[in-house]
Structure formats: structure tokens, C-alpha cells
């Protein structure tokens, strides 16, 4: 495991965009070179600050998509939000070689620390980003913990990391992924579009007696629904960790 971020006062750093790639038509991954990066844990996030020439600034938080690293590179996957001034700039304007201010890593609760327990990940939309960091970290250390990801997404075209998830399911033993499409399904898909429900989590999650570590990230209604269902199914609320956001339905 790479060294984790050391506790201390967070400060702003000027990172440089080293490369970028489109995950979908509205979501872009930025690979940032960050000087003196202290390392991070899977599930942490950073604050990003944009400052205009007239002094106006805007700040947003984005989950880290990359695995733990000592190399000073941090990946952020930014889903464009309608009328979102920061996400629109990061997706449509920021270019490779340009600087960007960030502060972090932030957070110590919603993190995976290579514990031995089975893991259940539930992601809604771009809430899959910090969960992907956990999946990548497990792959990096060749973890033996069984991982299950339930990924709720509108359509197949909206799936983030689609090719990588297919590859990891094939190559990372013990990783399972189930998609819950809410608007449209692929041809031949055995289920109708719909939101996650009791059958979804009962069938594709871990049973409560496995005592899995649970991480849920997505819009507030998704997070609350998923957590309530898991508790009703008998999961220990103390084992359920949640991260929620607004703006992206």
C-alpha cells in the first residue's frame, strides 16, 4: 500500500493537467500532476478552486478516482452538471498543460483501508467515482477480499469506466459488478429499467451474516433508499458508510 495522507493542515496546491480522457459524452477524467502530494486513501476527495481574473472564485469538491499513489498523480472524473460553472469549465475549457488549484486529500470516514472483510459498493451515477478508487486499490494490492459493486446508472451510454470494469471483472478474482439501469437497458438485458430495490440488494448484495463493509455514494435520495433497504434486510448500520452529493440527478 502507498503511504496515506499525513494528518495536518490542508493547503492549496497548484496542479497541472497531465492528460485527460472522456469516460462518457458528459464526463471527463483529468489526470493531474500534483507537487508534494502526500498520498491518499481510496474514498477521499479534494477541493478544487477556480479563480477568475477579476478575483471571483468558485470551489467544489470532487472524489479522487485514482488508487492510492506515491507518484504525485491524482485522477478526478468530473460529470458535467447542467448550468454548473465549475464542472463545465473542467470538462469543456481546461486543457492539458494548464494549472488548477486543489486542496486535499479530505476525509477519513468514507475510506477503504485494505481491511479483510467482504465489501459491498453501491454507486448512483457519478457516485461510482470513489468506489472505483477502492476497486483499483484492491486490484493494485491483489486483494483477496470479495468485492461486489451495484452500479445504478441511467443508460448503458452513461456508465463510467465501462471498459475497465469489464476488464477488472475478468481479471480481478472476487470482483462482481451488477448494473441497475434506470432509463434504458442494453439489448437482451434480463431486467426492465428501474431503481434499486429490495430484490436488487437481496440478490446482488452480500447477506447480512457476511458482515460486509458497505460504501454507498450518490445523490441523497439514492443513498438514503439504499441504506434504508440494507438496514431493513438486517445489515449492521455501523458497517454502512455513506457519501452523498447534490446537483447530479
Image: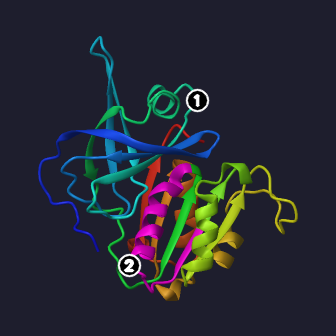
- Callout 1 secondary element: loop
Prevailing secondary structure class for the magenta stretch in the rendered image = helix
Q: Is residue 132 magenta?
A: yes
Q: Residue at x 53, y 48 (%)?
A: 219
The residue lying toward the viewer, choosing from 184 and 51, is: 51
Q: Nearer the viewer, mark 1 or mark 2?
A: 2
Q: Residue at x 88, y 65 (%)?
A: 188
Q: Is residue 183 magenta?
A: no
x, y percent for residue 200: 69, 70
Q: Is residue 142 left or right of residue 101?
A: right
Residue 205 appears in the figure: no
Q: Residue at x 27, y 51 (%)?
A: 106
The residue lying toward the viewer, choosing from 179 and 71, is: 71
Give the residues drawn in magenta, as a range: 126-149
The residue lying toward the viewer, choosing from 210 and 224, is: 210
Q: Residue furthest left?
A: 8
Q: Residue furthest right?
A: 188
Q: Earlier in the sequence, mark 1 or mark 2?
A: 1
Q: Is residue 116 above or below residue 177?
A: below
Q: In whole angstroms, how far apart are the C-alphas of marks 1 and 2?
A: 38 Å
Q: Which residue is mark 1?
A: 82
- Callout 2 secondary element: loop
The residue lying toward the viewer, choosing from 238 and 144, is: 144
x, y percent for residue 180: 70, 61
Tag on residue 141?
A: 2
Q: Is residue 48 above or below residue 109?
A: above
Circle 2 packing at 10 Å, graded few (<14), some (14-19), many (20+), is few
x, y percent for residue 88: 51, 29
Amino acid at each position: 500500500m502507498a503511504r496515506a495522507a499525513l494528518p495536518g493542515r490542508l493547503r492549496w496546491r497548484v496542479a497541472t493537467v497531465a492528460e485527460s480522457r472522456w469516460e462518457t459524452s458528459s464526463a471527463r477524467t483529468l489526470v493531474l500532476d500534483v507537487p508534494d502530494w502526500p498520498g491518499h486513501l481510496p474514498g477521499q476527495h479534494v477541493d478544487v478552486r477556480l479563480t477568475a481574473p477579476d478575483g471571483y472564485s468558485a470551489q467544489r469538491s470532487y472524489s479522487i478516482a485514482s488508487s492510492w499513489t506515491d507518484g504525485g498523480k491524482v485522477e478526478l472524473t468530473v460529470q458535467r452538471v447542467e448550468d454548473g460553472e465549475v464542472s463545465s469549465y473542467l470538462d469543456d475549457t481546461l486543457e492539458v498543460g494548464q494549472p488548477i488549484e486543489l486542496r486535499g486529500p479530505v476525509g477519513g470516514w468514507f475510506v477503504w483501508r485494505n481491511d479483510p472483510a467482504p465489501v459491498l459498493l453501491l454507486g448512483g451515477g457519478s457516485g461510482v467515482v470513489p468506489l472505483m478508487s477502492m476497486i483499483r486499490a484492491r486490484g493494485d494490492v491483489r486483494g483477496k477480499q470479495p468485492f461486489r459493486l451495484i452500479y445504478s446508472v441511467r443508460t448503458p451510454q452513461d456508465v463510467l469506466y465501462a471498459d475497465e470494469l469489464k476488464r477488472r471483472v475478468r481479471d480481478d478474482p472476487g470482483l462482481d459488478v451488477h448494473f441497475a439501469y434506470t432509463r434504458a437497458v442494453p439489448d437482451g438485458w434480463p431486467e426492465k429499467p428501474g431503481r434499486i430495490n429490495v430484490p436488487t440488494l437481496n440478490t446482488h448484495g452480500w447477506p447480512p451474516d457476511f458482515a460486509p463493509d458497505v460504501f454507498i455514494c450518490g445523490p441523497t435520495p439514492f443513498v438514503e433508499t439504499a441504506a434504508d433497504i440494507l438496514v431493513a434486510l438486517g445489515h449492521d448500520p455501523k458497517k454502512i458508510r455513506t457519501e452523498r452529493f447534490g446537483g447530479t440527478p
